[in-house]
Image: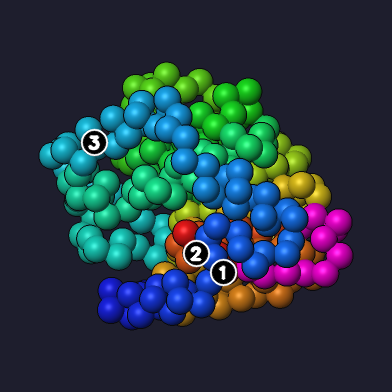
Amino acid sequence: MYTRFQLAKKYLHYYITASNGKGHGIHSPFVFDFIKNVLRDKRQYDWYDIIETGRKKLLKQPAQIEVEDFGAGSAVIKTNKRMVKDIAASSLKSKKYAQLLYRIVKYYKPETIVELGTSFGVTTSYLAAGNTRGKVYTVKGSPAIAEIARKTFESVDLKNIELTTGDFNDTLSALLIKLNTVDLAFIDGNHRKEPTLNYFKQLLSHSTNSSILIFDDIHWSADMEAAWAAIKQHPSVTLTLDLFFIGLVFINPDFKIPQHFSIRF
């Protein structure tokens, strides 16, 4: 993974070179619509306060748990015995991006959502709240963290979440066979090139023309940047949006010429 200094330099370059976050100079009607109605939607939805109350409780929880980590590991915490509040502080998706995921789901209304990397369930809750008529199938490797996530779902009274515990490599294939198709996927775990590309290929084979695949931490390391570059070059990918901390992938064949945007957010 990159050091904080390296990541800061990369973010500065992104911020300077990315397209205007207000949509100026964007000639794709689809992308302009995304910026106007999703990225820059400033409304304060009721779910925001409900879910953020749960985040605040996690950030204060002193309990210590034993964590199994099947991915690239924590960027901050190196021991397997960790305090809940420390994990929450280092690994929960920021409010800014978690709420963006809520707006994406609310606007595009995917019915079948897959999440790889539940953490404590905050981002999962945002995905589920965005469309309560849909269902989120989320996978977490660590049983101890998964148990806390279940309590998060109960605290916000979301019933449209199904949580599976286990290694992504063992659980994803069976889950995709069960679901058949996936409308939206959020991949936030095992931040390494080959596993990430493996998840992408599996999800791609169960996607439709309107599916959205979202990858977390695409600039977290050289390995993740290589994975993101390979995803962009895949012949099925027709549109990508680089928001630095997450990347969105679209495979709609109506986009005749592949386009790749970096947008300031």
Q: Give the answer, above or below, for where 228 lies relative to 110.
A: below
Question: Foreground: 73 or 28?
Answer: 28
Name the residue: 64% across, 50% down.
34
Badge 3 is on which residue?
A: 56
Element type at mark 2:
loop
- Label whose residue precedes the other's in the sequence (2 or 3): 3
The numbered disc on residue 264 is 2
Name the residue: 39% across, 38% down.
122
| Magenta residues (range) | 251-261
Decide whether residue 20 is among the magenta residues: no
Residue 235 is left or right of residue 127, and the answer is right
**How many marks are shown on the rendered structure?**
3
Q: Marks 1 and 3, how far apart in space?
A: 33 Å
Give, as a three-letter code, the residue at label 1.
Ser
Name the residue: 44% across, 50% down.
97
Badge 1 is on which residue?
A: 19
Residue situated furthest left in the rendering: 62
